[in-house]
Amino acid sequence: MRPRSTASPTRAREHLAILAGALAAGACGALFDQITATISPEYFLDGKGLAASSLPFRLAVAWTGFRGGLPLGALVTGVGLVRAARSDRFSWRAWLARIMTALAAALALCPAVMAALDPFGVREASLGAWPRGAATRYLVCFGLHAGAYLGVLVGVLLDGRAALSRSPHPRAGASVDPSMDG
């Protein structure tokens, strides 16, 4: 007698959705890193250690960004699937828009804070090693990357808190959580 599969067609579609979300975010991460590598090659060469990479610089940058985006895409898609399963009123468009809003706010705030405060003493540490202005560009790039992770995480946590709670909201009927509105 052959054992029965425990995976349902719905479960397989959910797994594929998480994979697709991870791959899409990986592609966004690769593109994001191409842009930020233009701002500060030093961030990648020295900060990420890509100076030691055997890959061409832009390819190494893209690979780094792709790998960095994978878990964020899986997280956003996974929590979105949980939210969708718990409410008939869930909207992917609204879910992603709210995460993008948090992401945009973090991308605006974090680089400015990082460049203004220089919390790790990058400017002083880079004196004589980098050309003038490179430390500020490094800090901006660092802030953009921190902001990307922070924005997505804050968006998921703030908007996904209902999905992450222990007691699921029933699918039928009205939701008591206004963030479930699409």
Image: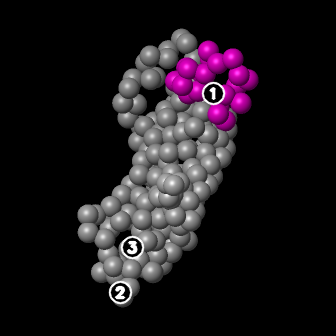
Local crowd size for mark 2, using a 10 Å CA cut-off: few (<14), some (14–19), many (≥20): some
Residue located beneath label 2 in the image? 174
- Element type at mark 2: loop
Q: Which amino acid does the dot numbered 1 rest on?
A: Pro
Q: Nearer the viewer, mark 3 or mark 1?
A: 3
Please indicate, yes or no, whether residue 168 appears anywhere in the rendered image: yes
Residue 116 picture location, percent across and down: 42, 37
Of 25 and 139, the residue lying toward us: 25
Mark 1 is surrounded, within 10 Å at the Cα level, by few (under 14), some (14 to 19) or many (20 or more) other residues, namely many
Magenta segment: 43-63
Q: Which residue lies at the image location 71% right of the left edge and 22% below the top edge?
A: 55
Q: Nearer the viewer, residue 167 or 29?
A: 167
Where is mark 3, residue-wise? 86
On screen, 114 above or below 17? above
Question: Is residue 20 depicted above or below 85 in this figure?
Answer: above
**Dot 3: within a 10 Å radius of its alpha carbon, few (fewer than 14), some, or many (20 or more) residues?**
many
Q: Secondary structure at mark 1?
A: helix
Q: Mark 3 vs mark 1: which is more N-terminal?
A: 1
